[in-house]
Amino acid sequence: MGDFDGSVAVITGGARGIGAEIARKMAADGAHVVCADVLDTTEIVTEIEAAGGSAEGRPMDVTDAAAAADAIKAIHSDHGHLDILVNNAGITRDQLLVRMKPEDWDLVLRINLDGAFKVTQPTAKIMMRQKSGRIVNIASVVGLMGNAGQTNYSASKAGLIGFTKSLARELGPRNVTVNAVAPGYIQTAMTDALTDDQRAALMKTVAIPRLGTPGDVADAVTFLAGPKASYITGVVINVSGGLYI
């Protein structure tokens, strides 16, 4: 028996990277995972099903409130319940503030912060009626500590942390928990492109001298979404190897 047997979990940005790893782990532990993304989810859904798990892909643009609400409504209608939401969809458009294009500021906030609102609002209504549910938001360590060249991204993730804490107070009386995970430097295609000198400089900033993995983040998410975290809400788990202490 898995911790998520019988549960339906929606993971935005679930086509690849951290979102796909969260989907793998939840499916392996018994959840039916809905990988919601603007990207093609065929690969991750096929992989999960081949491993014996249950998954489906759903097109979802988190910047479109009506479309996001329709997708959540359809998922609930198809399965009869919606137990877990992981707000993972996000982008970066890094640049120093004095050089940042207004459209890059707007896009990052629209996807990373506004998108979480647009998906969470219809989901929260369902969970409140159920009197149960788990919401986990993927923030970032830069939302806690800031980072030069990422004013837009840092602002969006700091906003998501405030969103998490306030919503936890609103939904707690209905047995719905809301928490966040704040990853640090995670092994991705972007970090794969670092030079040896850049990687060495990066390792000097963390207490544990390695990059994190998508699995490190997914483990924190699955804990917060699972039964062992039933009395934990409004917290931010910092998964950064000691980058921010």
Image (tube, rainbow, N blue to C red):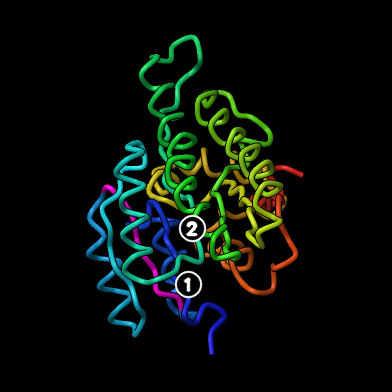
- Picture quadrant of residue 52: bottom left
Q: Which residues are magenta?
A: 31-38
Q: Would you call the spot at circle 2 few (<14 residues within 10 Å), some (14-19), or many (20 or more)?
A: some
Q: Does the image show residue 160? A: yes
Amino acid beneath label 1: Met
Q: Helix or strand or loop: what does disc 1 sit on?
A: helix
Amino acid beneath label 2: Ile
Say which residue label 2 marks: 126
Which image quarter holds the C terminus? top right
| Inter-mark Cα distance, 2 to 1 | 21 Å
Disc sitting over residue 26 in the figure: 1
Q: Helix or strand or loop: what does disc 2 sit on?
A: helix
Q: Is residue 146 left or right of residue 127?
A: right
Above or below for 34 versus 193: below
Where is residue 82? Give x, y as percent: 46, 65
Q: How many marks?
A: 2
Q: Would you call the spot at circle 1 few (<14 residues within 10 Å), some (14-19), or many (20 or more)?
A: many
Question: Which residue is the extreme one toward the top?
Answer: 98
Predominant SS of the magenta segment: strand
Disc sitting over residue 7 in the figure: none
Which image quarter holds the N terminus? bottom right
Looking at the image, which residue is at 40% across and 74% down? 32
Looking at the image, which residue is at 36% across and 47% down? 69
Q: Is residue 37 magenta?
A: yes
Where is residue 134? Give x, y as percent: 58, 61
Q: Is residue 220 left or right of residue 8?
A: right
Q: Is residue 121 left or right of residue 39?
A: right
Above or below for 88 versus 23: above
Which label sits in the foreground, 2 or 1? 2
- Picture quadrant of residue 140: top right
Q: Name the one closer to the observer, 111 or 218.
A: 111
Where is residue 187? Give x, y as percent: 48, 53
